Amino acid sequence: MRGRLKKITVFITVLSFLSFLNFSCSSKRSFHNYQYENTKYYKTNKYQLKIPYNSKVKQYIRYYTRKDSKFIKNALERANLYLPTIKKIFREYGIPEDLAYLPIIESGFNPYAISSSGAVGLWQFLPSTARRFGLTINRYIDERKDPYKSTIAAAKYLKYLYSIFKDWELVLAAYNCGEGCIQRKLRYSRNSYWYIRHKLPSQTKEYVPKFFASLIIAKNPSKYGIYTNKKPVYIVRKKAKAKFKLRTLASKLGVSYKQLKLLNAHLNKEIAFKGVGINLPSHKVKYISTNKNMTKQIVKKVNFRYKFYRVKTGDTLYSLSKKFNTTVEKIMEFNRLKNHEIKVGQILKIPVE
């Protein structure tokens, strides 16, 4: 009897051990699958970034095009007011133009957007980060809401993050949760966002696939049944030479007051003071007065005409800007140049005011 009990005990012990081994191995295997999500990338020249196309990106493409298409449509229509300026600034700072679409998931391209944590503007800067990258915040202006100045700050921040991580997916994650957060997660892991994704804060886990999904849609919205009607607007940046109200300026220029507000959301009381930067749509006459008679012109009229010029030996964009009394940025914008390189014999459009 004792021998039989002993055999049964041994059998149960062995069976329990084998069950434990099976559970242990399957747990490790499932954890490994959870730990690293293998991803494929588009092979196309349509984007400047490497575009992942995995289950998470597909999930958000379906979400944005089926359940939240109205949000994407509204964001893209607002984007037309800012994208030309953002892309121009990003070219100047060497930032991939694909990242110009980041405000879709940050703010829906709404300069008045405020998060629960107190982040503000197109690029959702917290006060500490905003001041760190040169933005002014006081009772009169909040440059986090300035589409021009905040974009310069965003370009500087993105460039700084890239100098640390050398990988744009990690840069995106760090933009959301901070460089310290990503550095800590990378300490014992591969240098890959998808490898550390499960370790990140819940919002950051979704942030990168959300961005790539919105970028894919934004590059070809009609493919997903999303159509926008508004045309791109180019911004001219000027400094106010006197105090004035935005409503007065809108009336004088014959532009939409709503549009002018969106371009100058940084003016907290919709009043510009002397020396404050203002953003104006480039296709309009840009002038405003300094007194009740509205007679003193403070911003020159701009007519976007151009002439053709064949590049000669020794010409640079800088020398041409001086020769024709324009700017390097305008020449690049007119000719859709991605960098400052020009070739002898090349025909350029030179803007003439």
Image (cartoon, rainbow, N blue to C red):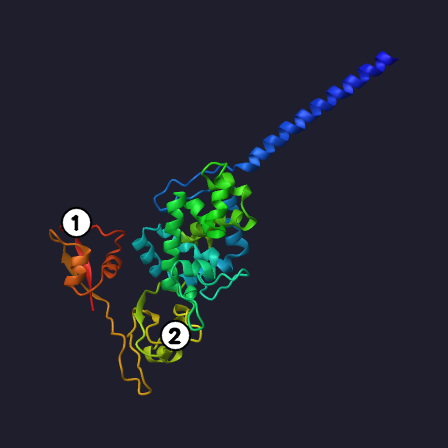
Establish if 290 lies above or below 147. below
Task: State the residue at coordinates (19%, 57%).
Answer: 318
Tag 1 secondary structure:
loop
Q: Quadrant of the N terminus?
A: top right
Percent position of residue 70, x then y: 50, 60
Residue 147 position within the rendered picture, expressed as x and y whole percent measured from the top left: 39, 64
Vertical placement of residue 303 versus 108, above or below: below
In the image, is 167 to the left or to the right of 312? right
At a point 43% along the width and 49% down the height, the residue shown is: 216
Residue 245 numbered tag? none
Q: Nearer the viewer, residue 118 or 83?
A: 118
Label 2 sits on a secondary structure element that is loop
Residue extending farthest right? 1
Residue type at the position of mark 2 = Ser
- Residue 227 visible in image: no
Q: Is residue 282 left or right of residue 342?
A: right
Residue bearing the label numbered 2:
256
- Image location of residue 167, percent across then percent down: 40, 43
Q: Nearer the viewer, residue 115 or 301?
A: 115
Q: CA distance from mark 2 to mark 1?
A: 41 Å
| Quadrant position of residue 92 | bottom left
Residue 77 pos. (x, y %): 42, 62
* Circle 1: residue type: Lys
Which image quadrant: the C terminus?
Answer: bottom left
> Given the current orientation, which residue lies at the most extreme left position?
313
In this rendering, the label closer to the viewer, 2 or 1:
1
Q: Do callouts 2 and 1 mark residues in contact (Cβ within 8 Å)?
A: no
In the picture, measured across the screen, residue 315 lies left or right of residue 66, that is: left
**Mark 2 burial class by Cα count in 10 Å: few <14, some 14-19, many 20+:** few
| Residue at the spot 51% in from the left edge and 40% down from the top edge | 196
Quarter location, residue 222 = bottom left
The label on residue 343 is 1
